[in-house]
Amino acid sequence: MSNNLHILILGAEHSVGRALIERAQSLKIPLHAIQGTDWDLGDRALLLQRISDLSPNYLITCLPVAAGSAADSVMTDGIAHDLADICEQLGIVLVHLSNNSVFAGQEGEVFKEDDEPSPQSEEGQYAWLVEQTLTQRVKQHFILRVGWLFSSLGEDDVSRVLELARKHKTLNLSDTKPMCPTSACDVAYVLIAMVQQSRYATLWGTYHYTSSEPTTLFKFAEVIVAEARQMENLPVQSLESDARSPQNACFSDTSPKLSTRKILFNFGIKPRPWRQALSRILKRQYSQARKAS
């Protein structure tokens, strides 16, 4: 494989896709960023032609998974099948962003890459199906599973906490619900680092990445509210630990923990703390809101 980098991002409108664009541009890496709605993802011949014309040596998919036939801006098993075959045919490395929903989390259990997935949710079942399709059909591939993602787009658990903090004087959230919040910009950093290093060593396979600070929903909300109060006069006056509160229904029921030892051993990538990323992202959100108003 050539040591030159040329990346094609598919799903550029999603949080990690946008972060990948910023990271690649900061490193002056040549790239093409394609939104899921830009192409007819169900047209295999068109996909082959478009990808062949762009001639990338890495294709990074950031599309969320979904069931059924081809649809706009999602990754189905059929699309995964076609992309894998095209990448194998053209000698392109396929990099796929997956998530921890492929596991059924038990309290205290930490999943490694070679643990057998046992998805319980519909999302997890489709995510695992797509992973299997890719690993079986393209040799040169990376699959990166991540945990709870947050970003500056305002479509995640950070925005949900702020929405509750603007509506209620008291937040009642679980201090027993484990989570490992991970920023989209950190995931982009990791993906680019994996791509860069893979030019010099054969490291194909599945990897896990999450932030370095496991926490709970309650403690995560405490940090969000404390940071946001520096930029907004929030109505919320207190936060209480309550695992039975209806407010918990706004968030995922479970977040299986992932081991990050393999990515550290193979790539030297250490998990980053989420607090600094959260602070940067909140400041960016408020700055963007002020500019828009």
Image (cartoon, rainbow, N blue to C red):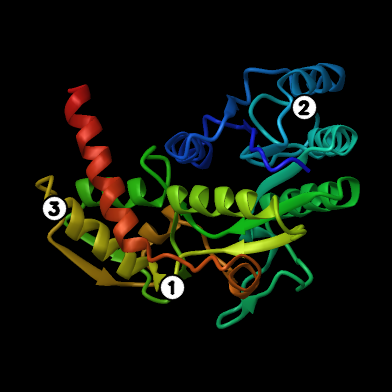
Residue 98 shown left or right of residue 225 in the figure: right
Q: Position of residue 200 (x, y in %)?
A: 70, 55
Which mark sits nearer the N-terminus, 3 or 1? 1
Comparing marks 2 and 1, which lies closer to the viewer? Answer: 1
Which image quadrant for residue 87? Answer: top right
Residue 186 shown left or right of residue 63 in the figure: left
The residue indicated by pointer 1 is 214
The residue indicated by pointer 2 is 70
Q: Position of residue 245 (x, y in %)?
A: 36, 65
In the image, residue 181 sits, relative to residue 107, either above or below, namely: above
Instruction: Find numbered disc 1 in the image and state the secondary structure of the residue it sits on.
Output: loop
Q: Considering depth in this image, is 280 or 238 the residue closer to the camera?
A: 280
Q: Residue furthest bottom?
A: 108
- Amino acid type for the residue under numbered disc 3: Arg
- Amino acid type for the residue under numbered disc 1: Pro
Q: Position of residue 277 (x, y in %)?
A: 34, 55
Using the numbered discs, state the Cα–Cα distance from disc 3 to disc 2 in whole angstroms: 43 Å
Using the numbered discs, state the Cα–Cα distance from disc 2 to disc 1 in whole angstroms: 36 Å
Residue positioned 45% across, 53% down in the render: 186
The residue indicated by pointer 3 is 229
Q: Specify few, some or many for label 1: CA neighbours under 10 Å numbering under 14, 14-19, or 20 or more.
A: some
